[in-house]
Each structure stands twice: as C-alpha cells, then as structure tokens.
Image (cartoon, rainbow, N blue to C red):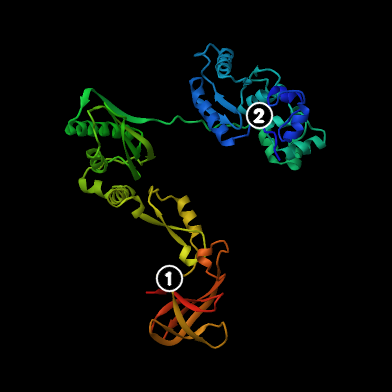
Amino acid sequence: MQEVVHGCERAAAAGVRAGMTLAHARSLLAGMAVRDQATTPEEDAAALRRLARWMLRFAPVVAPDDPDGLMLDIAGCEKLFGGEREHARRIAAALARWGLRPRLAVAPTFACARAMARYGREEIIWIAEGAVREALGPLPVRALRIDERSVEALADVGIERIEHLFVLPREELAARFGRELLERLDRATGAVVETIQPIQLARRFEAAHAFDGPVRRPEIIEATTRELLTRLLKQLQTADRGVLELIVLLRCVDMGPETLSLRLTYPNRDSAHLWKLLSPRLERVHLGFGVEEITLRASRTGRMARQQAAFLRETAQEAADQPTALGELVDRLIDRLGGAAVTQVQPAETYVPEAAFVHTAVREIAPRTSGRARVAERAIYPADRPSQLFDSPEPLRILSLVPDGPPVWLEWRGQSGKVVSGVGPERITLPWWDHRLLAGATLRDYYEVEDEHGRRLWVYRDGGSGEWFVHGQWM
C-alpha cells in the first residue's frame, strides 16, 4: 500500500494529508494532473544537510531540522545584514532563487520559531521578546512537536490549542500527559534553554605545487612531493589530526592525472613512516612527457591526542603512542603482504565455539575506548573455554554408565584411560539458519573431562549422530 508522505500546497488545499493512501489522494485530486514521486528519505536528508552547509553564509550556526526544515542562530548577525527583518528577507530571497518557497520565523526560542514557521499564517513572522506566549497561544498543540497519542489524548478533553495549556495547572498536565509535554512547552516559552547541534564544514587538508613547465626528472618529483607532505602534516598537526587516507594527484601533460592512494590503519603524522610507504608507489608511476602539478590531499583523517614535548629522548620514546606504533607495524605488513593477508580477530555474538571469533581484514585500528570494550565484553560468552580449540573436532571413543550419560572411559589419539573428573553437560544449540555449522545436528552436549593421564579435554556428544568428539584441550 502506497501512502502520502509530502504534498504541495494545492494538494493540501484539496484535503491531501500525510499518511493518506495514494488512491485516496488521487480521488481528492480528480480532474487535476497528479505527479507522484517515490520518497527517498536518505537522499532527502543528504540534500537537507547540503542546504544547511550552504546556509552557513547567513549564520554561523545552522542545524538541519528533519525532515524539511533548518534552524539558524542569527543572534549578533543583524548588523551585518541591516537588521533582523532585512536578514530574514535576504534568506527568503536566496532560498527562492533555488526554487524553494520557504516559511521563516524569527523568535527568541528555537521551539517558538519552529512552531511559528510551520503553523503560523504568514510566510515571514517576527516574534518580539515578550510576545512568545501570545504568539504561541492560537497554534495547535501539535506545533509543540509532541507525539500523536498525546495530541489525541489532549483533544479528547477539549485541549486543541497551546493557549489551553497555559491556563491549566502544571502538576495536573504532568500527571495526566507526562513530563514531556511540559518540557516541550517550556522550550517554546524559554523557561528551558534549547540547544541545536550545528552542522560542521568538513575541513580540507591539501597541499599543491604547480611547476612552470613539465617536469620529468624523478628526483625533482620526489623532492617536491616530500615538501608537500611536510606542509600537509603541519596543517594536520595544527588541527590535532592524522592521516588515515592519503591521495597523491600527478597532473601530466599528455594523459589524465595519475592517482596514488595510501590507506593507514591508525591516524599518523610521522613523515618518515608515510614516505616509506609512499616512495615505492611514486617510483612506479608513469610520468609520460612530464608532470605539471602535484597535489597531496588527506581525504580521510582521524583525531590524534595532543602530545606534550619531552625534555629527554628516552622520555619521548617512552611517551610514544602505542596504537600509533602498532598502526605503523600493520601498515608495513599490509604494504608487503597485501590487505587480505593481515587480519585481526574480533569477537562474534554467538554461543557456537568455532564461530565465537572471526578474522577480518585490517582496515583501521580504532583506539580502545570504554564503549568499544563494553561491546566486546557483551559479545564474548563468559564461560571457561579451552586454551587450544581445534579447527576440526576430532573423533573420540567413550564408554558411559548410562546411555547419553557422561563418559567414564575414553580413547583419543591412540591413548586410552579412565575419566577421573568431569563437569557437564553444557548444551549448545546451533543456529538453524547456518547450514555450515549444522551438518545434520542441531545441538551438542559439552563436557570438561580429565583422564588418568592428566589430559584435560573439552568433549561433546553430537545430538544428531550420537557420536563423540574432542573440540579442544587445556594446555
């Protein structure tokens, strides 16, 4: 079933509302040319954020107000644009040039401006400092951005406009409709300060050099690239960031630009390490009839902690960032062996022993944080597991006193003996959707046993075939 998400003003005047079926909307628009378009929430959100970045020319703080609004903090900007009213007119005119029909409201609070822009009668509205309650009064309670259940509950007792809320005791409103209603009301009136999350411009870290003419000598290309790398790292140092991905563009005379890409596993600003990885790639580049321009760009960067200068060399080495050193080692291994050959072990949220940890290619070494530690701790099943887990469980012969009971005697790897102690069973049910693990069985009963030879084994009985296997041992 197709539903209406947004509609133009003519559709709204005909009675079309969000949530209405497309067939119902077409029936209301009979006789009109109807043009429907599939909704794309992700693309709409991306476009709204692009517009928010463009609007930074009118205000230093701009935040998207999903799904189709923008919040601007224009405090202190009125002198630059000839006052608040002229400022708002310029914003409206700029948006109109993009083919948009904006509704603007200038108010002392964000919530009031949002409510007036969306539910007010005028296209551009100014609300004075002491006129917030008076301006909000005639608006529907939906303008406070409360959920539909609260709107319907308020309507059931005859509360349809915000002015009705002002005359009711706050304790009764909170008790009957929840604290959120009061919080929304306080944000609109200014009793509670509301902040917005401003959009940030992505800073571009780049260094470039254009030659007077084509250059073919490799030593000049290398020297220029090293100088650009030094300049680029100074920019990153000022911003306390390091390189995660480095792009080198060589604009040649007789062909398209040659591109070199270098990916790192941890943010890095070490010139020697970066040049050691970049230099072999630069030597293999075909220069054609000469290079006219070289550009180095840090396309991806990561935050690096600010380091205090050390007085002694030994102290500086001891204070080196361990993740950075690990990242440099992994970078060299990837450079020599390839990205697929260097993996890291990560916990998986499963009870199946052979699937509890997976190997993934190293793309980035993230710093250890309390949040990541808690996620890993939740993924690891807190149970005693053998120090050596076999890639493939090995067959085992056992004797037990009762059918399907614990083993009292076993034979494994040509050596037999009595079981002197055992703990179990621990039943593990295999995931029904993973046919690689099932192999005809749905569950296993695990036992931790020790035989008379001192071998401490982790054995299980297959629930499908009834056969026994050794899955690991404690060394």
User: Which sits in the foreground, 93 or 30?
Assistant: 30
User: Vertical placement of 48 versus 474: above or below?
Assistant: above
Disc on res. 188: 2
Picture coordinates of residue 196 (x, y %)? 55, 31
**What residue sits 41% from the left and 51% below the top?**
368
Which secondary structure lies at badge 1? Answer: strand
Q: Nearer the viewer, mark 1 or mark 2?
A: 1
Q: Are marks 1 and 2 in contact (CB under 8 Å)?
A: no
Picture coordinates of residue 45 (x, y %)? 56, 33
**Tag 2 or tag 1, which sits nearer the N-term?**
2
User: Which sits in the foreground, 65 or 293?
Assistant: 293
Q: Callout 1, which amino acid?
A: Ser
Crowding near the residue tagged with mark 2, few <14, some 14–19, many ≥20 C-alpha atoms within 10 Å = many
- Asked which quadrant contains residue 259, the reply is top left
- Asked which quadrant contains residue 410, the reply is bottom left
Disc on res. 304: none
Cα distance between the residues tagged 1 and 2: 64 Å
Q: Callout 2, which amino acid?
A: Ala
Picture coordinates of residue 336 (x, y %)? 27, 50
User: Vertical placement of 121 versus 6: above or below?
Assistant: above
Per the image, the residue denoted by label 1 is 392
Position of the N terminus, as image quadrant, is top right
User: Which sits in the foreground, 128 or 61?
Assistant: 61
Left/right placement of residue 125 relative to residue 61 reads: right
Which secondary structure lies at badge 2? Answer: helix
